[in-house]
Image (tube, grey):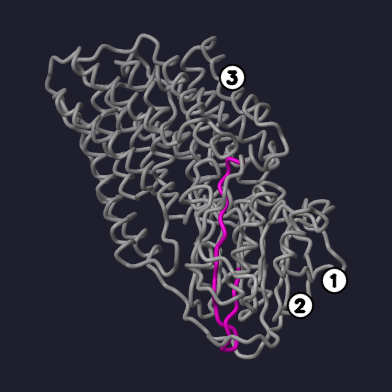
Amino acid sequence: MTILRGPAIMLALGLVLLLDVLRVFLPSLITLFGRAGETPPELMGLYAAAWFILPFLALLAKPRHALLGGAAALVLTRILLQAGVGQLYVASAGVTAGLVFLYGCAHTVPRRAVPVGVMGGLSLSLTVHLLLDGVDLVWRDGLVPWLAALSLCAAFLGLVRPPEAEVDRAPTLTWFLLGPAMLLTGVAATGWAKPVASPTDLWQVLAGTGILAVVLVMVVVQAAHPPLSPVFDLIAGVVLVAFTLVLTLTASYFAVLMIGWLGALLAGTARPDHPSGRRPGVAVLGGGLVFFVGLFVYYAAYDMNLGFPNGLVLVAVAVLVAALSVVTALVRHSPRPVAPVRLGWLPVAVVVLLVGLVTLGAPSAPPVRAKQGDTFTLITYNIRMGYGLDGRLSLDKIASWAAAQKPDVVLLSEVDRGWLLNGGHDDLARIARGLGMRYHFAPAGDNVWGDALLTNLPVRQVHSYPLGAHDYPTGAQAQAIVLEVGGKEVGIVNTHLQAPEGQAPEVAAIARALAVGRDADEAGHRAAGAGEQVKRPVILAGDLNTRPTDPAMEVLKAAGLTDPLTAFGDPPTSPADAPKERIDHVLLTQGLTAISGQVPRLPYSDHLPVLTTLRLTSVDQEG
């Protein structure tokens, strides 16, 4: 049986477009509607929910009209996003359009085409996203991204056509599980812990590529040859939950294997012994609500105390998928022969994409370069996940600006390395490549959210210490660093304070311990004694969420830190569009002096960077 390739490919391409739009919609909620915390989360949640509820109006339309209208609107919004027009509201409308399109698909796409189309679309979107280094076409300017986006839209529209006769529709459960599958796939595909230091080992690249190859082969084969035994469904359900636990407990990239087992379960629900869906359109829209609620509860843990680990949200969704699939298989099992789907060119395409992924992902690290002389340049910048004031992804612009300053050390805050909520890209790896620098990542909120040091100077020691929560749910850390400038040691404490009143004494103690000569891996455990002398100059820098006149600043000054920017006009750093206060700092101990200090007006974040040139003065570093 040559399964209805047209409907399957149409569904797959439609999902690719919808996921493209979602990866714009979700960060736009934070950066444009929410303005990174300025808008009450309840209001932001209501706004987001509205675009997942509006598609239920499609119940009043004929399925063929929903299919055609949703597809046309989805393409229009995708083109407008490529042009950068009305990002927040266009992306919002695109989410609704995509769900209306899926509502039409639920009534018009034949049963056997659904698993292939759904899992093929999710896998294709994942693979292209990784091949593009997490920076989707929508964030790229120039002729080539435009041609690629228009070609995708044209191919999709060319396949959109309602069937001429009634079709054997997929079961209601198959369509309902699409939403949970999107959530689990989206988080697993990019939410695994990345290497904390560059360069990435070649074996890690090859292992990740091999796992992706296994996943894609599993998805295609299982969707084309659905298993007939309920025992296999049970095994697939148990393995799905197990890999979800692996993701939530260790953030291992092996968790991407869950996508393959999702494909097995989804294919099983569409077996011919299961009756056609009575309300498949309602089911797919309900699954969309599961996606929305699961996503926002999962990421809400970083702004409020849920009372339970947020990983349980993903585990609960995986258990839901497994339980519904297995129960359905056990209750309705009466195996009938299923004609296989001819895969055609798909395996070849998978191999080509994976070869490209290996080529693009092969590690290459710049050499360590010793710094001669006693001066060096330092940048500290809260990059807000890489999104500028216009809501556009600005990672390459950040890297380009920073590279032009020829810095020796770059310290970054709010570095996101894979949150689906923020688009699923690795800020740090992208900026490091643009700067031609090595990096050291310091997880804070979780394994893919935190702060980072970038430098090609010799780094002798680096260690990250978790800071106390002090009733603030978002995690914070202090990255203790010892590097070498002109043959002398310089200590750095790189941090992003979330609760300055409680965390300022903690980072002050770490800075003081580094200053008296403690190693980075003991600075957070062995406090400096009252009579110990400074042996090493230290910098405390980052988004401290502290004004120069706040009590927390007095705590830092009492530890021997001074604020050199007061001598350079005390420039404000926040908010970036109309700066009024300085909450981003570069503080110095004895042994360092600032030659220059400035806060350039840049639109690449909601904070402004602090750019300083520092000079080493005499400090005894013996011992």
Instruction: State which tag comes first along the sequence, 2 or 1.
Output: 1
Q: Which mark is residue 290?
A: none
Q: Is residue 79 visible?
A: no
- Residue identifier under label 3: 54
Residue placed most toward the observer, 283 or 31: 31
292 to the left or right of 330: right
Task: Give the vertical position of 622 relative to 195 (above or below).
Answer: below
Residue 58 percent coordinates (x, y): 53, 15
Q: What residue is at 26 percent from the left and 28 percent from the top?
A: 267
11 to the left or right of 17: left
Q: Nearer the viewer, mark 3 or mark 2?
A: 2
Residue placed most toward the observer, 173 or 607: 607
Task: Give the vertical position of 101 relative to 344 (above or below).
Answer: above
Residue placed most toward the observer, 376 or 226: 376
Q: Are marks 2 and 1 in contact (CB under 8 Å)?
A: yes
Q: Quadrant of residue 4?
A: top left
Magenta range: 472-492
- Residue identifier under label 2: 594
**C-alpha gap between disc 2 and disc 1:** 10 Å
- Residue identifier under label 1: 568
Residue placed most toward the observer, 239 or 103: 239
482 in magenta: yes
Q: What residue is at 34 percent from the left and 54 percent from the top?
A: 353
**C-alpha gap between disc 3 and disc 2:** 56 Å
Instruction: State which tag comes first along the sequence, 3 or 2.
Output: 3
**C-alpha gap between disc 3 and disc 1:** 53 Å
- Amino acid type, label 3: Leu
- Circle 1 residues within 10 Å: few <14, some 14–19, many ≥20: few
Please tell me whether mark 1 sits on a helix, a strand or a loop: helix
Q: Nearer the viewer, mark 3 or mark 1?
A: 1
